[in-house]
Image (spheres, rainbow, N blue to C red):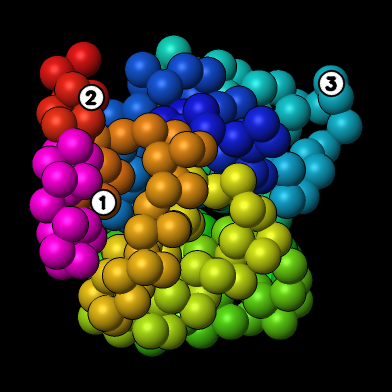
Amino acid sequence: MRRARHSRTSGREQAHLELFGTGGLEADPVSRNVDLHFSMRPFASEPTGDGSAEPGPADGTEAERFYQRAGEAARRGRWTEAIQLYRELLVLEPGHAGAHNNLALLLERAGEPAMALDELSAALRYHPDQIELLVNRAAIRAGMKQYDEAEADLRRAIRLAPSSADAHFNLGMVYWRRGLPEPAADAFRRALDHDESNAAAWYYLGEALNHAGDHAGAQFALERSAHLEPSARTFHMLGRVFDRMHRPTEALEMYRQARDLEAR
């Protein structure tokens, strides 16, 4: 998984680690290192991967053996094999949330977002109140620019789980992509109320506040992000904020730190 910033990993991040095993297998073309760091697509790039939203069948069953084999194939980068195994599992257990969810992740990676969306929708027919599934479907929908539908999924997730930092963060990203920095900032703040260790949320809060004209607030948020997870992207944005605050010496220092990190 791209992020190592958290002392405790979020549910979706941990799930992705467990499905794919190592960040070196993350070949998503947009995530997980856009501009050398944070994903501009935190939704679809990291759907839950371990099926933790819904327990799988008991150990030793045929379905469980398919599930374990599919997970191993995915960890080894054998995407086609993993997809086929998850599909065979779903013939046995049509309501298996983990299989639908992991299959959606793999299909989205393979450039089939519509098929991925179908898998998450199928899982939600069996498990309509699973927060991870709702957030991940919003991820796919946002990646397809279906912003109204993505927002509806996220608002449902928030109604079901008001303390879901993932849901608030992704709602902020929907607003951010729609060019609405003020509501985006509000959503990022709510995400941080529930997980103040989220460097990406601090970063995007800084971006949103910068666009909204609150440069002091943007500075604070970006400095928090840089403290949690230093990145060239964050220091470069801090340089831009200092430029807008007419503080050229500090801006130059931020740009220098950004270059140093890019050179590593």
In the displayed structure, 196 sits above or below 141; it is above
Local SS, label 1 = helix
Q: CA distance from mark 1 to mark 3?
A: 53 Å
Query: Mark 2 sits on what residue?
Result: 261
Q: Quadrant of residue 131?
A: bottom right
Using the image as rendered, state which of residue 99 and residue 190 is in the foreground. Answer: 190
Query: Mark 3 sits on what residue?
Result: 60
**Three-letter code, disc 3:** Gly
Decide: marks 1, 2 in contact (CB < 8 A)? no
Q: CA distance from mark 1 to mark 2?
A: 14 Å
In the displayed structure, 86 sits above or below 11; it is above
Q: Of the residues tagged 2 and 3, which is closer to the observer?
A: 2
Residue 33 is left or right of residue 189, and the answer is left
**Three-letter code, disc 2:** Leu
Q: In the rendered structure, which segment of residues is drawn in magenta?
A: 241-255
Q: Give the x, y percent position of residue 148.
A: 38, 86
In the displayed structure, 109 sits above or below 155; it is above
Q: Give the x, y percent position of residue 28.
A: 28, 37
Image disc number at residue 121: none
Residue 95 is left or right of residue 79, and the answer is right
Q: Earlier in the sequence, mark 1 or mark 2?
A: 1
**Residue 242 among magenta residues:** yes
Asked whether residue 131 is in view, the answer is no
The residue drawn where x is 30% and y is 70% is 215
Q: How would you rate the neighbour count of disc 3 (Cα within 10 Å): few for under 14, some for 14-19, many for 20 or more?
A: few
Query: Mark 1 sits on what residue?
Result: 238
Q: Main secondary structure of the magenta part?
A: helix
Residue 203 is left or right of residue 256, and the answer is right
